[in-house]
């Protein structure tokens, strides 16, 4: 790919304006500032002339970017430059989330039709990303090499990710290489006899890919958009940065790998079950334990940190314990451990520590049942409370779904539907467990805590009827 960043020179003047400065073309096709962006509501008073001017400068920017990266797919219709879907797809892959493709709104004829103003902040972010992308192509000769390869190799320098950020090669690169070695080792194991090993390290691979390429990544430039797969809403962040919130409520986004877009984060329950669960290969995280509340928190950072910290520990413990067991000649014990590694990600991390203590340390002695129960209470205690925390019914259900996913007979089902065998497994593992009871709201399609007449949570053991109603509803939401 031939790179010619001089094609973007006319837009560099915008980097000297304030962040809200709006770019337009003057009579000579030069870029000039024409007013300042006043927030999303400004669209209500935007005239046809203003919208046309905004489309013209956005068209000029796409032309400049196409020329800079030598992209095919530009044409002309009725005197207006047009852009093909392939052109926009390629440009989005090069620039990532900083491009904000949806702000251009290419119509059926291939023309820019959004009418939205192009701000200095957006131009600056795009120029910065173009510089990084050009350097990357210069080093690798390939603008699309952003995945962990089969050998776990990474670039000579930090490389761009699929969301437009820069990977933390120093943190995750060595583990990508170690995992590649493990994959080669276990490829020699019988897939049926050691199915738990293959399935477990497939989850480790998916989790590492998620951390390395999407979640725990840095900005390519201080002025660039937050590229993390879990972030504050861009519009809210922009208004916050320029001190123009005017009552705007905090909003959050996650990266949808299927569509390649950032979409609204509705709630952590939906994110855990509809997105995170599948992205990391079927692992449960207790997101309710993070210092984040959907309708109260002003920043996504505590939730993201909780996920990163636990997933990173899971990946590192899984890989390091494998090699430690291999060196100690304890692979049979390690493979046996993977048959039941723990229900949730948090538990699996703790169980690896227990495995290391029991099999890889000198002079280990197991704790008594009473001591183990006390340690469990301490681990589950909410900060600032004297007694042990009690999970809600929804959390218990999803916990046991993790065990269910570990059953070979369940994995062999072509369709994960509610069967007598499923119901029996869940009843055997749930009935009698005490929890905060929930009710299902058909309107919001969410579980809500049940309250008694005094407004306190209803806490009682689960019954067979609860499994057939509440648990079945949770099952259908997760596996439908």
Image (cartoon, grey):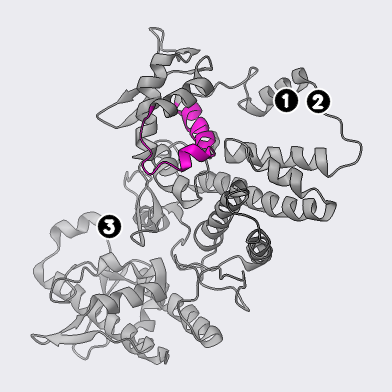
The answer to whether residue 335 of the structure is visible from this angle is: yes
Q: Which residue is mark 3?
A: 39
Which quadrant would residue 453 be assigned to in this image? top left
Front residue of this view, candidates 214 and 151: 151
**Residue 396 belongs to magenta span:** yes
Q: Residue at coordinates 38% horizontally, 39% vertically from top-left?
A: 416
Does residue 437 lie above or below 337 as drawn?
above
* Dot 2: element: loop
Quadrant of the rendering where the N terminus is positioned: bottom left
Horizontal side of 357 relative to 338 (left or right) equals: right
The mark nearer the N terminus, 2 or 3, is 3
Q: Disc 2 marks which residue?
A: 367
> What residue appears at the point 64 percent right and 48 percent down from the top-left corner?
314
Q: Nearer the viewer, residue 227 or 273?
A: 273
Q: Nearer the viewer, mark 3 or mark 1?
A: 1
Q: Residue furthest right?
A: 363
Specify whether residue 18 is in view.
no
What residue lies at 50% left-to-right and 76% top-to-bottom? 145
Q: Which residue is mark 1?
A: 375
Q: Which residues are magenta?
A: 394-419
Image vertical order of residue 202 relative to residue 158, above or below: above
- Judging from the image, what secondary structure is the residue with disc 3 in? loop
């Amino acid at each position: 790919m031939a790179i010619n960043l001089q094609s973007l020179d006319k837009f560099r003047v915008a980097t000297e304006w304030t962040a809200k400065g709006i770019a337009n073309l003057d009579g000579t096709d030069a870029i000039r500032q024409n007013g300042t962006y006043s927030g999303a509501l400004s669209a209500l008073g935007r005239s046809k002339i203003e919208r046309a001017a905004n489309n013209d400068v956005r068209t000029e920017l796409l032309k400049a970017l196409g020329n800079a990266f030598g992209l095919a797919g530009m044409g002309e219709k009725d005197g207006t430059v047009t852009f093909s879907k392939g052109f926009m797809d390629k440009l989005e892959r090069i620039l990532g989330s900083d491009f904000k493709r949806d702000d251009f709104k290419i119509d059926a004829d291939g023309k820019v039709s959004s009418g939205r103003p192009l701000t200095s902040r957006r131009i600056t972010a795009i120029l910065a990303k173009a510089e990084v992308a050009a350097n990357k192509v210069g080093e690798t000769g390939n603008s699309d090499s952003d995945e962990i390869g089969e050998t776990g190799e990474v670039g000579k320098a930090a490389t761009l990710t699929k969301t437009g950020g820069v990977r933390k090669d120093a943190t995750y690169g060595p583990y990508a290489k170690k995992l590649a070695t493990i994959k080669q080792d276990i490829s020699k194991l019988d897939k049926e006899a050691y199915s738990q090993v293959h399935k477990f390290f497939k989850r480790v691979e998916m989790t590492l890919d998620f951390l390395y390429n999407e979640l725990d990544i840095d900005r390519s430039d201080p002025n660039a958009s937050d590229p993390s797969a879990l972030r504050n809403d861009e519009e809210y962040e922009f208004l916050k940065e320029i001190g123009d919130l005017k009552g705007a409520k905090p909003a959050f986004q996650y990266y949808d790998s299927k569509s390649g877009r950032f979409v609204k984060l509705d709630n952590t329950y939906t994110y855990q079950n509809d997105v995170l669960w599948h992205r990391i290969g079927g692992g449960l995280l207790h997101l309710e334990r993070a210092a984040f509340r959907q309708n109260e928190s002003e920043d996504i950072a505590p939730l993201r940190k909780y996920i990163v910290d636990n997933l990173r520990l899971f990946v590192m413990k899984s890989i390091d314990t494998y090699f430690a067991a291999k060196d100690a000649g304890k692979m049979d014990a390690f493979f046996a451990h993977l048959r039941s590694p723990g229900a949730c990600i948090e538990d699996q991390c703790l169980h690896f520590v227990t495995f290391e203590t029991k099999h890889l340390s000198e002079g280990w002695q197991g704790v008594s049942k009473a001591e183990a129960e006390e340690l469990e209470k301490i681990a589950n205690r909410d900060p600032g409370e004297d007694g042990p925390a009690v999970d809600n019914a929804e959390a218990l259900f999803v916990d046991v779904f993790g065990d269910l996913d570990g059953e070979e007979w369940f994995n062999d089902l072509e369709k994960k539907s509610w069967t007598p065998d499923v119901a029996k497994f869940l009843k055997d593992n749930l009935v009698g467990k005490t929890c905060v009871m929930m009710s299902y709201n058909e309107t919001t399609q969410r579980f809500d805590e049940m309250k008694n007449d005094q407004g306190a949570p209803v806490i009682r053991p689960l019954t067979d009827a609860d499994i057939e109603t509440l648990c079945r509803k949770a099952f259908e939401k997760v596996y439908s």
